[in-house]
Amino acid sequence: MPQVNEQEFKKILSSGEYGNLFYICGSEKMLVSHYTNRLIEKTAGKKPSDFNFHIFTDDFDINEFASALQTIPFTSEYNVTVVRDLNFSDFSSSDGDKILELVKNVSDDSIVIFTYPTSIQKARSSLTGKEKKLAELAIQKGFLLELNKLTAAALQKKLISWAGKRNITLSPKNAELIINYSGTDLNLLKNELEKLCEYVGIGGEITENEIDMLVTKNIEAGIYDLSRAVLSGDAAKAFKIVDRLIYQKEEIISILAVLSSSYINMYRARIALKCGHPVSDLMKLFPGAYKNARALGFIERDCRRVNTAILRKSLDAIAQTDIALKSTRADDRIQLERLIVKLMMIVSEG
């Protein structure tokens, strides 16, 4: 069976035609864990028997692994063995070969699942050595499922679907807002959505007001709000945002780095407009630098509120603060707060 995607995997679960060897990996760790558990439930049951279910984690022992594979199932159809986050570099070359040989000769009434729910596992195309051989064996004797980060559109659909299952309305626009605030980590997004669903209740609707009030903003979203507060001259809001970011244990140097990126984005947009180009051209000039056209729309709106000279002076002030943070012993927070004041003064003078 070849490498399969998420939808094909769901069909395999329904069909019951599993094979004997499975390799589940990818950068979206929540999905890796979710579908590993789904496969375990289908093959070993919701409450697996100790006789027919074996799991290996950090304390992997080759002899115990061999013994587990030879177990004859008594109370279920399959003898299921799960290996989490196996790293061949932890073993000698001969031991690695022995693992592959054991897996290659697994009996028809055994199922072996190699899953990577926490470790950073390469994509199949980048695998080498024994990892590659294990993946190839999985394709021959079962399947390989690679679950990587979802696109923005797929994340929106996932959030809307989760809300719908709880009889709660979530529009595509507000699903996108949650993603902009929280980032693309699926586990974090699910936690934020559950918080919103609990607040609005069954039959309710998640609106922008609830999202602004309840969703924990990541550093990028927080800095975006900070730059807008600075441009508006709203000192109280600006310092409140700084307080929140520090409370969330964000490092001052990280806050400054993202603030710098925010101003660089506005400067790029400003120059594009001055040269007669649409701001959307930035997505072509800087591939991967911008999430989507909607994000660029916000940047364009903000850059129109200030002139080029203000943005240049602001970037100079940010650069000076960056140097000071890295070369002096002055309190980092005080230096950041001084920068906020200076940025607002530059806007006021401009």
Image (cartoon, rainbow, N blue to C red):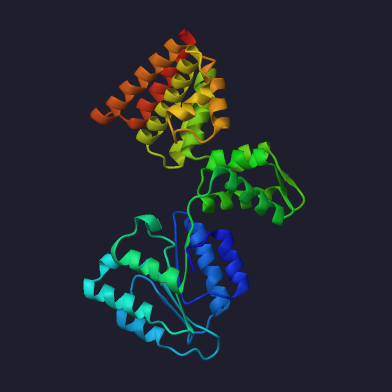
Q: x and y percent of residue 206 in the render?
A: 69, 43
Q: Quadrant of residue 39?
A: bottom right
Towards the viewer: 308 or 15: 15
In the depicted structure, whether residue 250 falls above or below residue 149: above
| View extreme (right): residue | 203
> Residue at the spot x=34%, y=80% of the render?
102
| View extreme (top): residue | 349
Q: How many marks?
A: 0
Q: For this view, does 279 lie left or right of residue 197?
A: left
Q: Quadrant of residue 268?
A: top left
Q: For this view, does 74 lie left or right of residue 62?
A: right
> Residue at the spot x=55%, y=85% of the render?
77
In the depicted structure, whether residue 272 falls above or below residue 20: above
Towards the viewer: 274 or 260: 274
Q: x and y percent of residue 279 in the render?
A: 52, 22
Q: x and y percent of residue 98 in the render?
A: 28, 78
Residue 30 can be seen, yes or no: yes
> Residue at the spot x=57%, y=52% of the render?
191
Residue 113 can be seen, yes or no: no
> Residue at the spot x=39%, y=66% of the render?
135
Q: For this view, does 207 lie left or right of residue 155?
A: right
Towards the viewer: 69 or 46: 69
In the depicted structure, whether residue 328 falls above or below residue 310: below
Q: x and y percent of residue 83 in the render?
A: 40, 72
In the depicted structure, whether residue 315 falls above or below residue 31: above
